[in-house]
Amino acid sequence: MGLFNFLTQEIAIDLGTANTLIIWNDKVVVDEPSIVAKDIQTGKVVAIGRKAQQMHGKTHKLIETVRPLKDGVIADFQSAEQMIKGMIKMINPGRSLFNPTLRMVICIPSGITEVEKRAVQDSAEHAGAKEVYLIHEPMAAAIGIGIDVEEPMGNMIIDIGGGTSEIAVIALGGIVCDKSIRIAGDDFTNDIEEYMRRQHNILVGERTAEQIKIEVGAALSELENPPADFAVRGRDLMTGIPKEIMVSYQEVAHALDKTISKIEEAILSALEMTPPELSADIYKTGIYLAGGGSMLRGLDKRIQSKTKLPVHIAEDPLRAVARGTSIALKNIDKYPFLMGR
């Protein structure tokens, strides 16, 4: 470090299917939806993040909105690169005198292939990074929650994001066994869209379905503090005219039931793979939930009744992975599990 320290900018990126967070100087400086709006004719980026999300589902034929990440991995290489570049510019928009050297730690799903890993590294390098380190999401979540990952103690972390649900047992600074399934928050949203169409004959867009999930989403049909019914507006499939209906949390719980069951099966499968000594630890420490999906009402209670284990939700589940990535960035030499070039 030293004299030219200001020339190197260290940033931690939680590159998520639904949201991208960038932490710089221990502060979340960017927290934007992972979406890009492009001009179809020129290929130029019109908007990134929140501005692009406001256009989602409302564009005319010359503009398209793209989500560069699907199931936790880069699906559109060019858009991902433009999105990372645009979000890095958001960190300090006033400074254009020189571009500092970037050192990045990016978190990736644990079930990622070598090709997908390479795509993340290349996108980061094209966006201006000189050094790129990768960290698995469950490991970042564990560090962000405050677990001492170097201890010879088993901890089970479940990170339910937008595209993937990561289930991992961590001990001695490594992932002992993990299960990564491509079922997560986006599937909850699709289930709600499908349910509204099938049950109420009303067509709603992705943004509205997401709103329903946030306002009245639930994993159980019996909640202690139930949310009030939510007014949903969409297009009537019979008449083609816009209409409004009221939706209760019980309906949403019913709509999400099958998808949540798949996540439960994956948790039980990961517990079956766990070595006996670590199973004994998990019985004591319980299961930790992180990621936006863990904020679904009653999900912790449902997992608890299925596994008969204590379930803890991270303090700020949406930012636990980003926080852990930031801590790993400051301790690059300490953590041997960081994958660098």
Image (tube, helix red, strand yellow):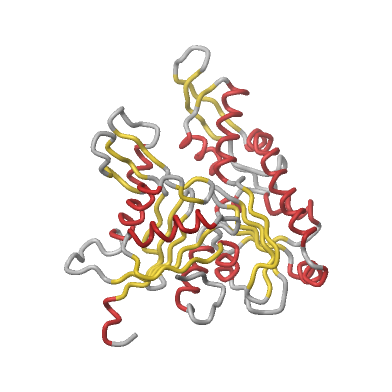
Q: Is residue 206 above or below residue 68?
A: above
Q: Quadrant of residue 11?
A: bottom left
Residue 233 vs 24, above or below: the answer is: above
Depth check, front residue: 327 or 69: 69
Where's the N terminus, which quadrant? bottom left
Residue at the farthest front position: 115
Vertical placement of residue 220 versus 324, above or below: above
Residue with the most extreme left position = 97
Location of the C terminus by quadrant is: bottom left
Image check: 258 left or right of 206?
right
The percent position of residue 75, horizontal first and vertical second, equals 46, 45
Q: Nearer the viewer, residue 295 or 42?
A: 42
* Residue 285 location (% of width, % of height): 74, 69
Task: Choose between 312 and 340: the one closer to the eye.
Answer: 340
The structure residue drawn at horizontal position 31% and vertical position 87%, both measured from the top left corner, is: 2
Q: Is residue 21 left or right of residue 248?
A: left
Residue 19 horizontal/vertical position (percent): 45, 52
Residue 59's x, y, as percent?
33, 31
User: Residue at the spot x=27%, y=37% of the render?
Assistant: 39
Residue that lies at the very extreme toward the bottom in this rendered image:
2
Q: Residue at x 62, y 56 (%)?
A: 166
Q: Is residue 328 left or right of residue 42?
A: right
Q: Residue at x 34, y 37 (%)?
A: 55
* Count of marks overlaid on the render: 0
